[in-house]
Image (cartoon, rainbow, N blue to C red):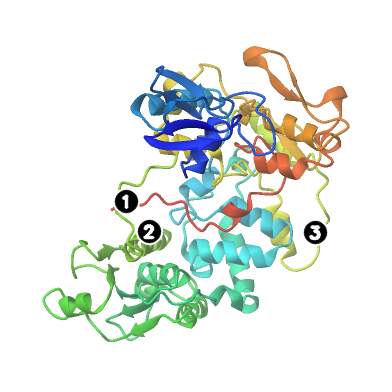
Amino acid sequence: MVHLKINNKEIAVAEGTTLINAAKDLGIEVPTLCYWEGVKPMNSCMLCVMRDSATGRLHPSCSTMVQEGMDIETDSGDVCEARKDVLELILSEHVGDCEAPCTHTCPASMNIPVMMRQIHEGDLDGAAFTVTNGLVFPGVLGHVCPAPCENPCRRNSYDEAMQIKRLHRETSEKARVDNPELLECPADTGKHVAIIGGGIAGMAASWVLRKHGHACTIYEKETIAGGKLRNLTEEELPKHVLDEEIESIMKLGVNFEFSTEVVAEGNFEAITEQYHAVILACNGVGKPAGKIFEGKEHKLNVRAVGNGKTAALWTHKYLGSVDFDPVPKFFDCKYGKLDKENLGNLLETKHALNLPKIEGPLQDARVEAGRCLHCDCRKRTSCGLRKWASDYGAEKKKYLSTDNPQVQILGKGNIILEPGKCIRCGLCVAIAQKHGEEIGLTFSERGFDMKIHVPFDHSFDDALKKSAAECVEACPTAAIAFRNVEDVEACHTTTLITLKR
């Protein structure tokens, strides 16, 4: 056995154990982009470096074997700085969108590209989940939202923007009739939240809280919920759409106390004492502090939904006794404005695969959804590079190249490769070898020009007949991916809102 210290904890491990595995035995999380259980490291991204206090040297922990007497630090200042430098060097070459422009500009943070894939492929139940959990009121917003998501649509530079508003409206009509499972909630947590205000922000907050198992009571001074939406004409917003979506809130188990006005110098204090938390979704009642949170109504209804969702997420954190440490902002890479050549590359990739003939329910909607360029990342929530760049506060522009980014997507079949996202970790090459692929993948060129390549000009589908799924799963940046599939975690994530208080 080899004896050493890691973060001042003594440990004995078998000879031949790597530092990364020794650290994992102590429950220490080690950042890495090129490590995958079951394959030997081909390259080192150097993100997993650790410092040996005895020598002062930094070691890549995925390939360095333990030695007797080592005194290892995994998170000291110089280790963290080295990791940040590694990330910023990698990011200087990274080309891609973490979020699609449409998702960026949706105040409720709905995952619009996932909705497009689901509608186009006929997964209407999945689309119902996406639009309802993303917008809470997809039918109402399908009528009254000014659709800020459509303005930045890259398709707009080619012919015309995607009809996002129309698609989530039509999907919501199907959802209200055919998807009662959307109203299912987890077991009660025993926590009860009061929401002051029965407008769209307050009800959006109640939806999110019920989906986390918390009981909710909404206090509304009027005799009916809906707030300012009740002032719209039938032409602007059919009242049956509003009523049906409010009924869905009620079916979740949300309790409404109508004709109950809450005032700052009256019953507000008693309500605050009665509940585990309070959300203010109206004006002039109180101020956020302690267990009191704010989810403001807004003249932009979709912004009001976003405010309600954010307030509910903060409240959920509070009810779970999560400390209110500053929440790191998600790292966000963007293509920026694309010229005609780069836009053409996206369009060419979009039409490279023979799309199935569209038949059945929502036929027109499915045809429209098929126009989407899917310029989002297929690992928006599980990308290792994004996670660690967020955690270490890495900046893309520190070593940014002066070259204009080039959008390039290789592959004509089901498997594609985006060279601009590839960090040349070699995991896909090693995994293909492990599975005994006849063709597999290899490296071409040298140094900074090194690329992943399919030998003899075969397709990626031919090269990865056995190992495609593991290669896609292992890829830390979604450089190699299935054309029309996004990671499962992202498809079931309702929001990536950065929480602020």
* As drawn, 430 above or below 179: above
Q: Residues within 10 Å of mark 1 (few under 14, many from 20)?
A: few
| 106 or 392: nearer the viewer | 392
Q: Residue 72's spot in the image, x, y percent?
A: 42, 28
Estimate the x, y position of residue 443 in percent, counting from the top left.
Answer: 74, 21
Task: Find numbered disc 2 in the image and state the secondary structure of the residue it sits on.
Answer: helix
Asked if marks 1 and 3 touch (Cβ < 8 Å), the reply is no
Can residue 113 be seen in the rendering of this structure? yes
Whole-percent x and y of residue 207? 44, 71
Q: Disc 1 designates what residue?
A: 500
Q: Is residue 268 left or right of residue 485?
A: left
- Tag 3: amino acid: Ile
Q: Which residue is mark 2?
A: 310
In the structure shown, which secondary structural element does the residue marked by tag 3 occupy? loop
Q: Earlier in the sequence, mark 2 or mark 1?
A: 2
Return the disc, 1 or 3, that comes first in the chain's sequence.
3
Badge 3: residue crowd in 10 Å (few <14, some 14–19, many ≥20) = some
Q: Which mark is residue 358?
A: 3
Q: Is 213 drawn above or below residue 130 in the view shown? A: below
* Residue drawn at (37%, 24%) of the image: 78
Type of amino acid under label 2: Thr
